[in-house]
Amino acid sequence: MSDAAALRASSVADEQGAGPLVVFVAAVACGIIVANLYYAQPLVDLIARDLSISPSAASAVVALTQIGYAVGLILVAPLVDLFESRRLLTLTLGAAVAALVLAATAPSGAVFLAAALLIGVASVAAQMLLPLVAGMEPEATRGRVVGTIMSGLLFGILLARPVAGVVADWFGWRAVFGLSAALTIATGLALRSLIPSRRPKGGMAYGAFLASMLDLLREHPTLRRRALYQASLFAAFSMFWTASPMRLSEAYGLSHSWIGLFALAGAGGALIAPVAGRWADSGLTRPGTVAAIASVALGFAVAGADGLAEVAWVGVGALLFGAIVLDMGVQANMIFGQRTIYALNPAARGRINGLYVAILFLGGAFGSAITSPLMTHLGWAATAAVGAVLPLVALAFAALDRGDG
């Protein structure tokens, strides 16, 4: 196909949009891919015991997956702006399958930890797919598409832990990674048949390509602003989902099964994603952002006041209300942010998305890091107060902002 013909085909695709089937498959695929980051979290004790990993090193099972993901966001995900999309997705998902099989068959702790790192790197395929499909959609409906795909991604995050627990109970922890490898193969085949080929202009050396990401961060204050908003919310999100299981276990005596059901109920917040996308398409990004950030602060504040309840089920209800409202705010603001940044530079969507997610990921890592010390030394109420203050700082900046994002 000539360059002119390719350009005409791309223009027609942009006018027609991705189509409901492609959007649905992309949403499911993102959920399946990103779930790989979270399967190990409830299985750390089983894996460590089976592979003779010392207690002091057991936390590395989860940490290395997260580190790999952070590395992949900067070094791998942006390559969607440099290489042909279908081949890049296939190779990245192939690497994910290999890493998952290695984890499922790992003969030692060292091999499993190496596999965990590679799983994190390869799971950035989800952050390649999102800007690809969103870029196929006309501006007028892009928010809805981003919202639909992000709802699939969030369901993948929230369902990964309970699914891993159930599968491990019945078939052992290795079966979790084997099943995920099979699902990832099916995902790769589906995407290869449905996602149109996209060939960026290319011609840039890898070093210069990475350096261009710093230029993008400097050139676009909207990108910096939206990333920092979401980083503060993701810090609160990480704090809540790290601390709330401790609170439910210690204060209310809930078992792991009940805590898993609590997490599933909290997944109801993901239902806001398509609605937020329609709001963004209707020009309501700024008021929607303020409302989303405020809801995160509200959710954490209500959850933090659970101890005031005289009846246990009212306290659990306060925590559940907080979980749903907080998740809704984090998810909605993510949609507003991604729809905004995808319009900044269509030729650099992969790099811009990688920067955005990497920055919010750092916020989440900060939230996770401070939760245990806060819970240990100051307790749940103080932890919730800090979790509510983080989005309030972002809210102050968002309320005063008069920019376009």
Image: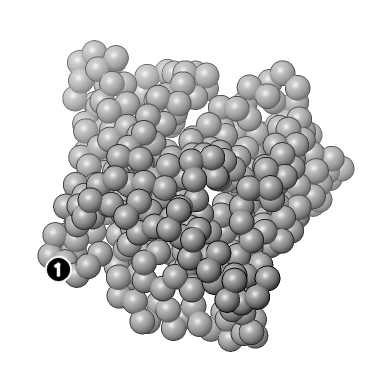
How dense is the environment of label 1, judged by Cα within 10 Å: few (below 14), some, or many (20 and up)? Answer: few
Q: Say which amino acid is labelled 1.
A: Arg
Which residue lies at the image location 52% right of the left edge and 22% below the top edge?
A: 256
In the rendered image, which residue does mark 1 sit on?
402
Mark 1 residue element: loop
Which residue lies at the image location 25% right of the left edge and 37% below the top edge?
A: 299
Q: Is residue 110 left or right of residue 389?
A: right
Which residue lies at the image location 29% right of the left edge and 45% below the top edge?
A: 278
Q: Which of 315 and 275 is in front in this view?
A: 275
Task: Quarter of the image for the N terminus: give it.
Answer: bottom right
User: Where in the figure is residue 40, as x and y percent of width and height?
Assistant: 64, 39
Q: In which quarter of the image is residue 315?
A: top left
Q: Which colour scheme is used?
A: one colour
Which residue lies at the image location 36% right of the left edge and 41% below the top edge?
A: 273
Q: Quadrant of residue 189?
A: top right
User: Where in the figure is residue 304, as x and y percent of width and height?
Assistant: 25, 35
Task: Quarter of the image for the C terminus: give it.
Answer: bottom left
